[in-house]
Structure formats: structure tokens, C-alpha cells
Image: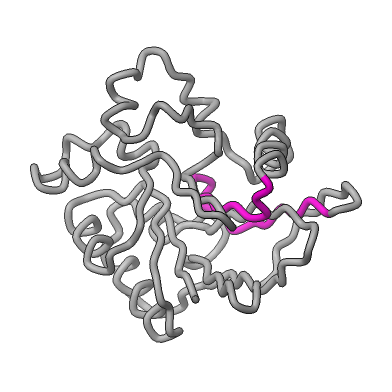
Amino acid sequence: MKYAIFSDIHNHTAALAAMLRHAHQQGVDRYYCLGDVGIDACVELTRSVNAVTVFGNWEVSNWQRLSPKNQGWVLSLPPQHKTGCFWLTHAAPFWPESLTTLNDVIANRRNLSFGRLFPYLHRESDELWDSIATLTEAGIPLMFHGHTHRQIIWRFTDDNQLQNLIQPKITIETGDTLIIGVGSVGQPLDGPSSYVIYDDEVQVVELVRITENF
């Protein structure tokens, strides 16, 4: 299957619509959203493609700005989504298993370190290495995240080398552990609006840029 994985729309409805059109043209089968969606119009577009969605820090702070219908949807979102082959989260995979929804997080907000839960992984850091360790211990070779507003791939190889990659496509090799920043739809810091396509049949991740005017 081909998955479109996107994040950090931040109220930019036209950019999200352009990204979804582009993904549809690429024959994408399923959509994943990694949070920081924004206003009701962006939420509605995200929900219209049945995107499996995790919440980001925007949702933690701004969920009350949404309509009652969309508030209910956002409050039910999880902090991460795990499959047997890859994980998805807004920033890092450190969420306690007891926190299954945004509602749980809000109820326990005073006891949480949001700096730890929402780190920036575009630079080498303790949080990056801890993320790699978490994935390798779980036997998961692939994680997608947003939050940094940048497209970047960290590859930890089976001979313990850490590589920082920025290239249009990458093939996942046996023994790799990959942490992939999908970029930002609405507020990219490294170029045009961006998202990722992951094809699990050929094990290829493509970093996509949207050049359409919107």
C-alpha cells in the first residue's frame, strides 16, 4: 500500500487541499496525519480523507478553539499510532501507555514534561538517540514524525552508524532504523509545502514537495 503522511498544517487550508490533491494523483491508498492541524476547515479536510491522526502540541493548547463536533474528535485522538512495521507520532515515541487520548493528557497535564514529549529531532540530541533506542528495543525499523517543520531522515545502520539524509527517495534496507521527519504542509522551514509517501510493498520512502500555487 501507499501511504501519504503529513503534518503541521497550522490553519493553512489551501495548502492542505493542494497536498491532498497531489497525494490522490499519486495513487495513495491511505492517509496519516501527525498533528498540529489547526482550524475547523483543516480538521474537516483531514477527516474527509479518513486520515488516521495523532495529536500534536497545537491540539494540546488550542483544542477549545474548534467547533464542538471537532473538539470531540480531537479529544479522542491518541499521541501515537503503532503498527507492526512502523510508528507515527507528532514528535517522539515517549508517551506513557496509560495516556491513550488527548483527553487523558489534558487531565494529567501538570504531571507531564512537554519538552520531553515534544522534542525537535532534526538535530542530533539525547532525544534522538533515545528515540532510536526505543525503536530498536521494540524491533520497529521505521518512525514518522512532524513538529520540526523540516524534512529529514535519520538512518541508524546495522553497523551502528548514524546518517543524516536529505534526498528525494530512500529504500529501507534490512537492519536499518529510520526516523523520518515528514516536513510541514502549512509552515515549512526548509522549502515548499511538504509531505511523505511511503510504499510498503517496495519499501521506499519519498520526500514530496508541493510546487502548485495555492
Is 1 above or below relative to 129? below
Residue at image point 43% right, 55% down: 7
Q: Position of residue 99 (x, y in %)?
A: 38, 29
**For this rendering, which residue is in front, 66 or 85?**
85
Residue at image point 46% right, 30% down: 97
Residue at image point 57% right, 58% down: 190
Q: Position of residue 36 (x, y in %)?
A: 36, 47
Q: Is residue 41 magenta?
A: no
As drawn, is 207 to the left or to the right of 39?
Answer: right
Task: State the extent of the magenta-drawn residues as a range.
Answer: 139-157
Please state, as top left, top right, bottom left or bottom right, where the C terminus lies in the image.
bottom left
Q: Position of residue 101 (x, y in %)?
A: 32, 35
The image shows a total of numbered marks equal to 0
As drawn, is 72 to the left or to the right of 167?
Answer: left
Q: Quadrant of residue 198?
A: bottom right
Q: Position of residue 189 (x, y in %)?
A: 53, 54
Residue at the limit of the structure toward the top, as seen here: 111
Q: How is the image coloured?
A: one colour
Residue at image point 52% right, 57% down: 183
Q: Is residue 155 magenta?
A: yes
Residue at the limit of the structure toward the right, as seen here: 159
